[in-house]
Amino acid sequence: MLILQCPYCGIQCDETELAPGGQAHLKRHGPGSSDEDFEAYLFDRDNPMGVHFERWRHANGCGKWFLAARCTTTLEVFGTYSAQTTEPPAEIADRIRARRPNWEGRT
Amino acid sequence: MSHRLPQGGRLVNRDAPVGFTFDSKRMQGLEGDTLASALLANGQGIVNRSYKYHRPRGILASGPEEPNALVGLGQGKRFEPDQRATTTELFDGLSAMSQNAWPSLGFDAMAVNQWFASMMPAGFYYKTFIWPRSFWMHIYEPVIREAAASGLPPKEEDCDTYEHFHAFVDLLIVGGGIAGLQAALTAGKSGATVMLVEQAAHWGGRAPVDGAEIEGQPAEVWINETLQTLGTMKNVRLRTRCMGAGVYDHGYALAYERLTDHAPEAEGPRHRLWKIRARQIVTATGAIERPLSFAGNDLPGVMLASAVRDYVVNFGVAPGHRTVIVTNNDDAYRTALTLIDAGLEVPVVIDVRDRVNSPLAREVSRRGVAVETGAAVMKVKGKKGVEGVMLCRANGTGGAGAPVECDSVAMSGGWSPVVHLWSHCGGKLTWSDENAHFHPDPNRAPTGAEGEVFVRTAGIASGAMGTGSVLQDASAAGAAAARAAGFTAKSAAARAADAEEAPMKPVWVMPEQALPELRSKMFLDFQNDVKVSDVQLAAQEGYESVELTKRYTTLGMANDQGKLSNINGLAILAGSLGAEIPQVGTTTFRPPYQPISFGSIAGEARGEIFQPLRRTPMHEWHEANGAYWEPVGHWRRPYCYQQPGETIEQAVQREVRTTRASLGLLDASTLGKLVVKGPDAGRFLDMLYTNKMSTLKPGRCRYGLMCNENGFLSDDGVVARIDEDTFLCHTTSGGADRIHGWMEDWLQCEWWDWKVYVANVTEQCGQIAVVGPNARKVLERLGGMDVSRQALPFMGWADGELAGTPVRIYRISFSGELSYEIAVPAGRARALWDKLFAAGVEFGATAYGTEALHIMRAEKGFIMIGDETDGTVIPQDLGLDWAISKKKDDYLGKRAQQRSFMTSPDRWKLVGLETLDGSVLPDGAYALGEGDNANGQRNTIGRVTSSYHSPTLGRGIAMGLVKHGPDRMGEVIRFGKTDGGTIEAKIVSPVFYDPDGEKQDV
């Protein structure tokens, strides 16, 4: 059972306090988008062995959505951060690079 | 012949006899016995029949790895199947029943299966029972289940209680043998908080039985001293009868404590499940001895050599009086010495190694026991128990063999560290050629949130085999874990020597060149009856992956999880494939280590507190007035209110008729209510609903639809605009939390710069629907506000007072009747409800439940989320195009609804359905098309989504989705019934009642 820190209320949350929300940093495609873009938005998800970005909601807590960067194989957590961003913040990316020198960044 | 020895037994109290029954037979044991030791003491050789072949089976082991001795324990409310006799402590009055034998253990009719064993090889079930398909459910499965039954499920409700504890510690140490104690001592001295758990009732593990010496004294002395020291440490918590069950992410662990299994009449909960967060976990879980594979290795009387030693030393019980020992390592010689010391006979030690010259072997020879090296057991003689063995050369085919008479066989195939907990959360293993086992690879340990190692192993669990090495390793592990948890710790191990032992020799089949006849009697997995020949056959048939072989042969899939069979099985597989064992690898270790009770998993969450019940303000009124309850989300809603002498169906019909004719009241408090407020609220709701909500005027209501990004209908409800910046959104009952979360998701994660707040006020308001032609009159009797058509028109709302109670009244209707939905502060809802009823008496008012609500909405052709929708239906399918704004550039789901499949004219669309004979269509029935599909199944062209008997129309009415439905009005189509017949129905408009909507708008 993971522990993730809610960046809003600072609580170290047990996974049971949280609701998962799937992959983070999806770009929404609406009316006017191509079939390919829309299909990717709806269905294409990363499934990496390694660095991954996820959405979580502190559902049984402050109610806020936040994002987490973690390693799917070792369970290492590189950090949690506000959901109100389209890219991982620089300090999160730096920490990932420090821990995973071969990480190629978000593709 | 008694099996209780005249002396010995360090764990039993010879002055305290204990009575118990086995298969209703009265027996006597001693305080301190396990059920297994007491059965052995009573000479009960056969304790079970095997799963597949119904072969007689006896006790094989002395601990949790036992595959055979599973019994049904207790009676009535305390009955529990599949309990291990080896881990069941004896108490006065214990009652145990054997399993899987009919009519009795001694004579089992199903034992004929073993004569046909050659016809039941690996994959037998898969191969044999596939065809004909229809035979599976009705013939094959019931027969197989009967024949291959293990324990029966309990019939009565469990009368015991269970609980959960949460603990936060620096170190969790699993295993209270000398390694666990040493690790706890070292870590405890650092000041770290330590929890040390031991699955058995006693500390010290195997060391006292094996005759280990620590600090120059018998191990027991050091164990007691160490326990005393640990007992004085306030930072150390010690729990016996507490098994480390699983290790999970980020230092989470489960421990399973059996508090009163050994004393069922004691006060308090029976089991306790510990939910532990540990900074560091040390597994000092020891090792398990492996059986050897020779023909007849499953006969009652064949036992692990270490278990034989346990029964003699711990319980003063002799499994046999004349025991042949067969081994590939030195440790089994300890069993020989133990038996001789107890005055028992050891005719021969059969050792597969060609030459053995170690102190243990020399000592055994010195005591006059013959040691046959380079030798093997060809087969065990006997039917219901061991009568002798046939001795042969280890490297041949066995030949004729030389008989040796005996009544028990002690076997040892080497030791495998218990790596389960290490492996649960990602720890990897490495193969040791020296010991022929997998042990944890410290360079590939489970890691935590910071990438740090959080599980370490101690003692034999690390692969350290000698007493001195065990203590060194354990102390180092305790110190390393304490340091990793932030403490200053130094390793200081108790002094002990490693015994001098000759190397073991891996041997996987005995004799090496055994022919099929012998191999098909060598059992690998005793609990699931998997033999050497089965695994070899699987390999031959192409099952090269160990995970597939496991599933094909069921090797390791019984509830002992292959504790004895794993290594032996994969060695056989590797041999058959011509591969190395490490290349074949192990199957996955999954928690729990041993089965744990369902009660402990549920803890206190059973009965009324399993899930908290949500109650509306009128809940007690419903209860007092004959409510027949229906669960709706976490709520209970009245399905109907039964009057004396009424059936449920009659009550529903009455409620509908009374409401349509005069007046009905509905508790609609469960309806979700979300306040959406802010300068961007209109813009936000325009994105969430398919309709345009921003154009709604304050004081007005609008029915709205919400879709997900796949375009599918997700929720519906009436939106009221309160003022320029404020909307009140009704959601479906039970949908409020989900939709609130949905709104927050978009506000927080996509449009975070929009100025909108959402608040869930569902429980702040009671809501009462006053419905029927006399609805206005009853409100006028209460008085306080103008509810006339002019002041409060259809689809309007107004704030005011009714009988002195502040209310907000919405003129909305889900029944098609004149209807007022009255929102009232929750604390005053019941009082208003009572006043409405009092005033309604003159109109013959009825309360109505969810079923009447459903029928009335269906008569009107109103859809219901979850009936007409199932996550694959778009609003356009339901003819709701009028509620989809054409003017908006965007809303959630719009893009998806433009996809080609969504715009196909062939989608099934909503229609009404009328059976030709007036009967009620089966809910969910499929409309039959012409011909069959590629799978030979009948083509379908639609399905029934709602179906009721309408009391208003006096006939069955239904709604359904039908291909090209709206274009086929008047056509008759056929629906399949579950009995194979069909029923005809005419396609009609879904609005059966008041199609022009005159009644609701008066």
Image (tube, coloured by chain):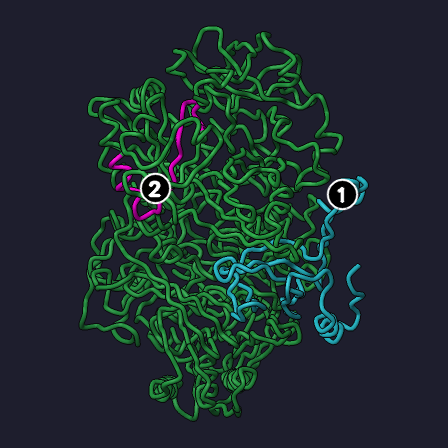
Amino acid type at circle 1 is Phe
Q: Residues within 10 Å of mark 2 (few under 14, many from 20)?
A: some
Residue B955 versus residue B85: which sits nearer the camera? B955
Determine the chain carrying the residue at label 2: B
Quadrant in which the N terminus of chain B is drawn: bottom left
User: What colour do you see for chain B?
Assistant: green
> Which residues are the magenta region?
B813-835
Residue positioned 43% across, 43% down in the render:
B54
User: What colour do you see for chain A?
Assistant: cyan
Residue A87 locus on image (x, y percent): 73, 63
Residue A37 versus residue B539: which sits nearer the camera? A37
Q: Nearer the viewer, mark 2 or mark 1?
A: 1
Q: Residues within 10 Å of mark 1 (few under 14, many from 20)?
A: many
The reply to whether residue B498 is in sight is no
The label on residue A38 is 1
Dot 2: element: loop
Residue B816 part of the magenta-drawn span: yes
The label on residue B107 is 2
Residue positioned 39% across, 78% down in the render:
B204
Residue B658 locus on image (x, y percent): 31, 20
Amino acid type at circle 2 is Phe
- The correct choice, above or below, for A40 with respect to B86 in the image is above
